[in-house]
Image (cartoon, grey):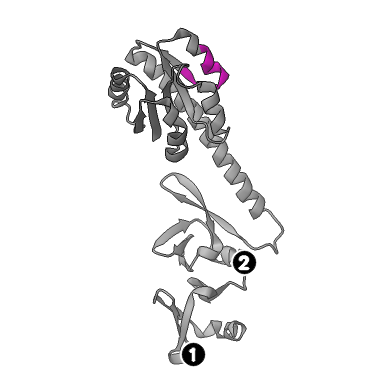
Amino acid sequence: MIRTLIVDGERQSRETLRGFLADEKDVEIVGELEDGCQAVSAIEEDKPDLVFLDVPVSHLDAVRMLEHLGPLHIPAVVFVTANEQLVLHAFDVRAVDYLLKPFRRERLRRALGRVRDQIALQRSSDLAGLLAAFLEEKGAQKDRHLKHLMVKEGGRLFLLRTPDIDWVEASGNYVRLHVGAASHLLRLAMKALEERLDPEAFRRINRSAIVNIERIKELRPLLHGDFMVVLRDDRQLTMRAAYRDKLDDWR
C-alpha cells in the first residue's frame, strides 16, 4: 500500500483528491491537513510514502519544509497547486510530479504511475541492501556464528536476531523458527543451521529440535535415559538419550 498524506488548504481540492484516490486500490490515505506548517510533524509521525502538497509560499516555503526533514525522511512528493510559479519549486525538491489545478483523473493517474515506479525502485534498493548484508554475513568465515536470519512474511523480508529464537523444529526440507507466539518457516536443512548457530547458545536435543539454552527452565528424567526439556513458556520437548552426552556442558 502507498500510505498517502494530503496537504492542501482548499477543502474542495482535498475532496477531489480523496474521491479520485478512492478508486486506487493500492493507495491508503493516512491523513489530511489544511495547514502546511503541520506537514513536517505529520510526515515525521505518520511516515507516509507519498505526499500531495499544496503549500502557498506566503504560508511556508515548501523547499525549506522538505529540506528540514532530511533525505532519509522525504517521501515521494506530488505538488498540487493553481500557482504555476510554485511548480518550479517541485524540481528544487526532486518532486516526482505536479498537478496544476484544475486537473483530471487521467492526469492524476499518470502522476501515480510515476510515484509507483519511484517507490518500487526505492523499496528494491532497500531490499538489495538487506540482502547484501545478509549474504555478506552468510559468506563470512565458517567459524563465525549467525547473528541474524532472513525470514519471509507476506512477501516481505525481515532480519530475525538468532538470540530471539526459542527453539527450532525440523519440518521436511525446512526448519520452523519459534519466536515467542510466532513461528517462521525457513528453507534450510536442520544440520546446516545447527552448524552455523553458536553452540554456546543452542543445542540439538533430538533429530528434530534445537533449543536456545537460555529458554530452558527445567530438565526432567524420563525412561530409557531420555529427558523432558521444559522451556520457560512451559513447552515440553524430549531430549533423547543419544544426546545426553551434551548435558555436562550445560552445567
* Disc 2: CA contacts within 10 A as few (<14), some (14-19) or many (>=20): few
Q: Amino acid at mark 1?
A: Gly
Q: In the rendered view of the protein, which quadrant contains the N terminus?
A: top left
Q: Which image quarter: residue 111?
A: top left
Residue 101 is left or right of residue 71, and the answer is: left
Kindly give the residue lying farthest to the front in the view shown: 58
Kindly give the residue lying farthest to the top in the view shown: 84
Question: Start and end of the magenta stretch?
Answer: 88-97
Q: Residue at x 58, y 45 (%)?
A: 130
The mark found on residue 8 in the picture is none
Secondary element under disc 1, as helix, strand or loop, is helix
Mark yes or no: residue 48 visible: no
Mark yes or no: residue 82 visible: yes
Q: Residue at x 49, y 9 (%)?
A: 85
Q: Amino acid at mark 2?
A: Glu
- The x, y position of residue 165, in whole percent, is 50, 65
Q: Residue at x 47, y 38 (%)?
A: 44
Q: Which image quarter: residue 231?
A: bottom left
Q: Which residue is mark 1?
A: 225
Q: Which residue is mark 2?
A: 195
Q: Nearest the camera: 86 or 95? A: 86
The reply to whether the magenta stretch includes residue 92 is yes
Picture mark count: 2
- The x, y position of residue 246, in whole percent, is 59, 82
- The span from disc 2 to disc 1 (Cα, nearest Å) is 25 Å
Q: Nearest the camera: 192 or 5? A: 5
- The x, y position of residue 56, in whole percent, is 44, 17
